[in-house]
Amino acid sequence: MTESISSKKILSTLRSNLDAINATVDQQEASVVTEVGDGIAHVSGLKTAMAGELLKFTSSATGHDVYGLAQNLDRDEVGAVLFGNVEDIKEGDECRTTGRVMDIPVGHAMLGRVVNPLGQPIDGLGPIATSHRRPVEFKAPGIMERQPVCEPVQTGLLAIDAMVPIGRGQRELIIGDRKTGKTAIAIDAIVNQAKTDMVCIYVAIGQKASTVAAIRESLAQHGVLDKTVIVAATAADSAPMQYIAPMSGAAIGEYFMYNDEHGNPADENHPGGHALVIYDDLSKQAVAYRQMSLTLHRPPGREAYPGDIFYLHSRLLERACKLSDANGGGSLTALPIIETQEGDVSAYIPTNVISITDGQIYLQSNLFFQGQRPAVDVGISVSRVGGAAQLKAMKQVAGTLRLDLASYREKQAFAQFGSDLDATTQYQLNHGAHMMELLKQKRYAALDVSDQVIAIFAAKEDFLDDIDLENVTLFRDQLAKYMQERHPKLREEIRDHKIDDDMSERLKTHIKHFKEEFLKAHPNKVAEADVAQTAEDNESAVADTEKETGQE
């Protein structure tokens, strides 16, 4: 007799079979393109589309997929910016929602490569093998997830490390007119990270392709290309590509900040990495965003920029921070660059970014043309948090440096009106001129922080005042070499401790010995001229005496 099948048994069998099925439902809304032009596509319908959602366009002519970013969410249509082969998309082509935000590939495999803002390689070296992806837009960490800036980022530039110091997790603005050396400072900062644990991301926005190629070559020559990622949205790229370029750079940097060296999420036991990202420059990104917004028929505000331009830069720059130890203690340091017109820092974009950042390095055109390189105006340049990350010795010697230079500038202006100056003013003018000369540095000639401290110490103790101005930088560089070769232990002490009385006396003795050797090899021209003049005066006096004696 066959076994009777009960309803309960059928029900349990069905349940077990249904549980075994692992099916997902992919919900996509499809519609058609009603209008396309200038890299902007208008799509009818798409009621479920979200702001910033990735949209998938399919070309009816080629069958290729082109992705876009949902920007305008109107009642009857969605305005989207297109990436990739914009020409492939025509009116009537299909558009679908994807349900995800835009993301790009990230990881250690990107180091040494040049990529576009979509994370695709453009250097001709083949595909990039990476399994990690990160969204280009990401919410910045909250207050409790951060810690104050406490570690320095050494640029190797005396004028910056001494007076406008940068710390890990800081946002320090580099601002100035075109051709004043803004990019040079940023590239020097990258080159100086060759022996540190910092990964560098250089984001080129709206620059010539030849300029990006030259920067890549420079980084390769100085051995830092293998720890640098270059994100390039050149002048030939569309406005949407230039718009997302900085955010793509931040996403690549965040991968290193939020993960350990093996690519796993960072925590107390697995420290996160450190990244330096340079946005060169945000003025061009703002112009690209303005172009996008006007094409999307958004209402213009001040200087025709859209109303949310401040929010664009604030949500980008807030992603730079120093994470708490519980989150791995990683950091993302941002050096945004802003180009001004005729030194106007009160324009819309400069004032916006100045208010968001933790200080600014201001470069002056007149200083640049006077031969002061880097052309940092120490009067209005400031670092709001970097001082907390300075070495104790540097903080000690550089404390009054800014005031000394400000006093020199003031007296220099008044000295032009009269020649009768008292001894104190003459000393201050001479001392200030030597200090300004000390701050001059050539490209790719980074100074170690301990050598910077020794150089400033020597200047403050008046060791430079009687040296020819043209020999000051030579004196500084050779003093650094002398201390490296003969007194390495003292250099290490300076790096770790404040300069006490004993250390001060030892430094004075060593600098004095070096100065004697230096003056033998490079005697002062002024002194030689004085000697020659004295000899000439003596000869003239003797001749006059002999003449008078002969007449008698």
Image: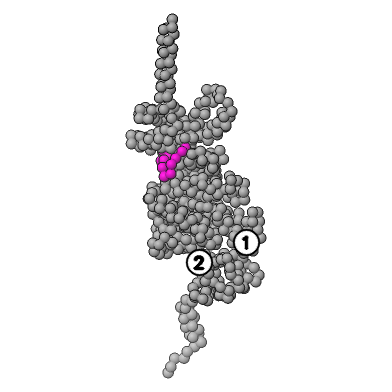
Can residue 489 be seen in the rendering of this structure? no
Let me know if residue 467 is in the magenta part.
Answer: no
Please determine whether, in this image, residue 97 is positioned above or below residue 343: below
Q: Which mark is residue 551?
A: none
Q: Which residue extends farthest left?
A: 486
Give the quadrant of the N terminus.
Answer: bottom left
Question: Between disc 1 and disc 2, whose residue precedes?
Answer: 2
Three-letter code for the amino acid on which mark 1 is drawn: Leu
Name the residue rendered at 54%, 71% in the picture.
89
- In the image, taking residue 496 as reference, residue 384 lies left or right, namely right
Name the residue rendered at 46%, 81% in the picture.
17
What secondary structure is found at the residue carrying circle 2? loop
Give the quadrant of the C terminus.
Answer: top left
Name the residue rendered at 56%, 53% in the picture.
283
Total marks in image: 2
- In the image, taking residue 66 as reference, residue 529 lies left or right, namely left
Magenta segment boundaries in residue numbering: 439-450
- Residue 228 picture location, percent across and down: 42, 54
What secondary structure is found at the residue carrying circle 1? helix
Residue pointed to by mark 1: 294
Let me know if residue 441 is in the magenta part.
Answer: yes
Three-letter code for the amino acid on which mark 2 is drawn: Gly
Q: Which mark is residue 84?
A: 2
Please determine whether, in this image, residue 450 is positioned above or below residue 534: below
